Each structure stands twice: as structure tokens, then as C-alpha cells.
Amino acid sequence: MARKVFGDTLRNAMGHPPAPDADAEAKRSSPTVARAQASVLEEDKHATRLLDPALVRMSAVMDRIDPAEGLEDLVASIRDHGQKVPILVRRMADGSFEIVYGRRRLLACRELGQRVRATVMEMTDEEALVAQGVENNARQDPSFIERALFVAGIIRELGRTDATRKNAQTVAYRALQIDESLVSRMNRIATGIPMELIRAIGPAHGVGRRVWERLCKLCETAPDRAQAIATEIPAALPGPERLDMAIALLSPQKPPPPETGRHARVTIARKGNRITLDVDPALLPQVEGAVRELIAELLDRGQDESAP
């Protein structure tokens, strides 16, 4: 009813004022009308409406490695039953919209070629990122590396200078409700592993920080090799196995074990003009006899060669 009763007031609030006259000036001075204007503006900030999905842009900070992965079930659900839960978007200064959360619902509606139901709010960058992070925590499926990428994205977008970096870290741990010390570790992991390799591995649900941290350290040791192995990870493997394979490919190769065949039963070492034999006790009599025969033969041969 508010939008019908306050016709001119609504137009004023939405940026379409009527021609000024004396009555309008009187209305604008009324406390009742002022409260109505404030009410209309507040309602508009939280309005739910149907939007063209093409008019909603993605935010700069990702919270999924691939939002389109496994989208078929959601597309089928919205096609059959409609969009039950609205997405949240914020209005930008240029009048466009940016997604805060609900990326998969937005992509599903784009796929179906239908308008998306959205709650429109006016939010700062920090407010939008905190809301996005809180919604991520409410889901059951964000993996460790996806949360780490979200932290790194916040620091990248809000912490561009030394002066703003501390505030960016504060926004990150508020958004994910994690310890501040973990923010730095997650940022290091997400930025220390090449993005090509992270995409090749995927979310790897169920794998925690320690395994990803191990991969990060290997990547820091051999960054060029880390980027190159992304093409060597088979996409058919489950995510955790892809992660294990990446670690195996980057781990230093162990030297082959020493030979344990028959030659290992007799070893020989030389130092200066001294030769030392280390012989299996079971072979000692045969080796000693063979050595004595060889020495005698060499000495006899030397005498024959020196004879006139």
C-alpha cells in the first residue's frame, strides 16, 4: 500500500520527481512524508525482484573452483519446481548488479534462459565479502582449498597496499569465522600453488590443510615443475587422488636401493696401494684360494715376460 498512497513520494525516492509546485514543497516539509520516503528507500534496498541474469556480473572473489561443476541437477530442479531461494546481489554505483551469493542458481537460470529471483541490497565491498563468506560457511560442501582461495581473493582485492592489508585479513577471518593466524597460512597455500594445478586437482573434498600445505611447499621448491605437471593429472581420478598424484610428481625421487644380488657377497675397496676385500664368511675359503691362485699366476706371468 505504501507505494500507492505516496505516489509522488515514491517517484521522488526512485529518482523521478514531479514538477515542483507549492503543494509539493509543503509535502516535502511534512515529517510524515519524510518518514514515508525513508521507508520506501529502505524497502527498495532490500527488494526482491526478477532480474535478467545477463545483467548480473560475477564478483572478483571466487568461492568455488568451478561453480558450473555438477550444475545439471540444479538446472533440472529449477526447471521442474522453480527457483525457491533468491540469490543476493548488490547494486553498483553505475546501476549494474553484482552477485554476492547464489552463483550456481544464477548460472542455472542463465542456462534455462529465464529471469533469476534476486534480493537486491546496497552493500560495500567489505559487507558483500563478509556476507559471501558467511553464506559459504553455512553450506556443507566448501572444501579447504576453496575456502583458502576465498581468503586469498579478499586479501588481493582489499589489501592492495600495506595500509589496507591488515584490514583485509580482518575481513577474511570475519567472513569465514576462523582464527586470524590461519588466514595467513591459507593465503600462502592458495597463492603458493599455481592456479593451473589447483584447477587440475579440483576441490578435493575431505582433504585438510596439512596435505595442501605439503603440496604448497613442494611447489615453492620447484615452481616451474609445479606449473608443468597440471597437464599430467588425469581428470578421471577422484580429487584426493589427483592431489596425491601431484605430490608424488613433485616429490624428489629416492635413490635406488643397493644391489643385493650375488656380487654383494664380495665387495672390494681400494685405498692407495692397498686393496681390501669384504667377503661373506661362507665364501671366504673359496675367495681366499682364488685370490692366491690369481696372485701366483700374475707373478709367474711377470717372470716369464721379464726372462731373456
Image (spheres, grey):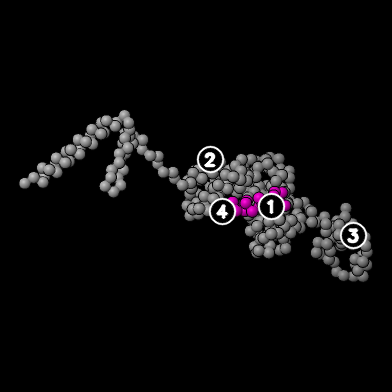
For the residues labelled 4 and 2, the Cα–Cα distance comes to 20 Å
Horizontal side, residue 15 vs residue 83: left or right: right
For the residues labelled 3 and 1, the Cα–Cα distance comes to 42 Å
User: Does the magenta run of residues contain 128?
Assistant: no
Looking at the image, which residue is at 62% across and 51% down? 185
SS type, badge 1: helix
Badge 4 is on which residue?
A: 192
Closer to the chain start, of discs 3 and 1, is: 3
Looking at the image, which residue is at 89% across and 57% down? 5
What x and y, as percent, mark residue 141? 65, 42
Q: Nearer the viewer, mark 4 or mark 2?
A: 4
Closer to the chain start, of discs 2 and 3, is: 3
Please name the predominant secondary structure of the magenta segment in the image. helix
Q: Is residue 303 above or below residue 153?
A: above
For the residues labelled 3 and 4, the Cα–Cα distance comes to 53 Å
Task: Tell me if residue 298 can be seen.
Answer: yes
Badge 3 is on which residue?
A: 35
Closer to the chain start, of discs 1 and 4, is: 1
Looking at the image, which residue is at 48% across and 46% down? 251
Closer to the chain start, of discs 1 and 2, is: 1
